[in-house]
Amino acid sequence: MKQTITTVIEELGSDNELSSADLDLVNQARSATKLAYAPYSNFKVGAAARLSGGGVVLGSNQENASYGATICAERVLLASLSVTNPGEYITTIAISYNNIVALSNKQISPCGICRQSLLEHEISHKCQLRIIMSGLNGAVWIVDGATSLLPLGFTSLDME
């Protein structure tokens, strides 16, 4: 037996097609790239999340000479959220990047660990978050839910 898993991605030609609220969130993610510490990769990632209470939380990647200690923008954001806004959940997260040594004109997608962390956030808060992925310019991708990016994610159900 074979099964097919389909991911639906909404692609916009540019950020001009976003709603004003989504464009504001994307611009905050782009600004958050300036807070990144990326002296090794020169690849600065920023994330901005709109919360259930209406506020916004930011995150940026933080590299380390010991690469295992590096933490991505999305997980910095999730850790900050749990401390600064306990009980709130993400309704929409925007992710962007600034590649210091190359163009930053295509969408960025969360890494595997971040996909798993976003999935865990959805499960623990019983919510579905929208993910907006962009560069500093160019086309924008939007997906509904972390399961769109990680359809076979490991969850608590796998441990039962």
Image (tube, rainbow, N blue to C red):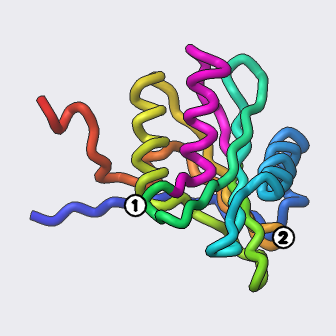
Quadrant for the C terminus, please.
top left
Residue span colored magenta: 70-93
Identity of the residue drawn at 21% across and 61% down: 3
Label placed on residue 113: none
Q: Is 86 in the magenta?
A: yes
SS at badge 1: loop
Question: To which residue does mark 2 refer?
Answer: 137
Residues at marks 2 and 1 touching, judged by CB atoms closer than 8 Å: no
**Which amino acid type corresponds to the residue marked 1 in the rendered image?**
Thr
Q: Which residue is mark 1?
A: 6
Q: Is residue 23 above or below residue 9?
A: above
Locate residue 112, reporting x and y percent: 42, 59
Mark 1 surroundings within 10 Å by alpha-carbon count, few (fewer than 14), some (14 through 19), many (20 or more): few
Instruction: Place residue 106 in its image quadrant.
Output: bottom right
Mark 2 or 1: the one toward you:
2
The x, y position of residue 32, in whole percent, is: 79, 50
- The residue nearer to you, when weighing 50 against 81, is 81
Question: Residue 43's spot in the image, x, y percent?
Answer: 68, 71
Name the residue at the front extreme: 65
In this view, 3 is above or below 138 = above
Q: In what element is the residue under mark 2?
A: loop
Give me the C-alpha separation between circle 2 and circle 1: 27 Å
Residue 143 image offset from top left, x and y in percent? 58, 52
For this view, does 142 lie left or right of residue 150?
Answer: right
Quick one: quadrant of the N terminus?
Answer: bottom left
Q: Is 61 in the magenta?
A: no
Kind of residue sitting beneath label 2: Asn
Of mark 2 and mark 1, the one earlier in the sequence is 1
Mark 2 burial class by Cα count in 10 Å: few <14, some 14-19, many 20+: some
> Which residue: 16% across, 65% down?
2
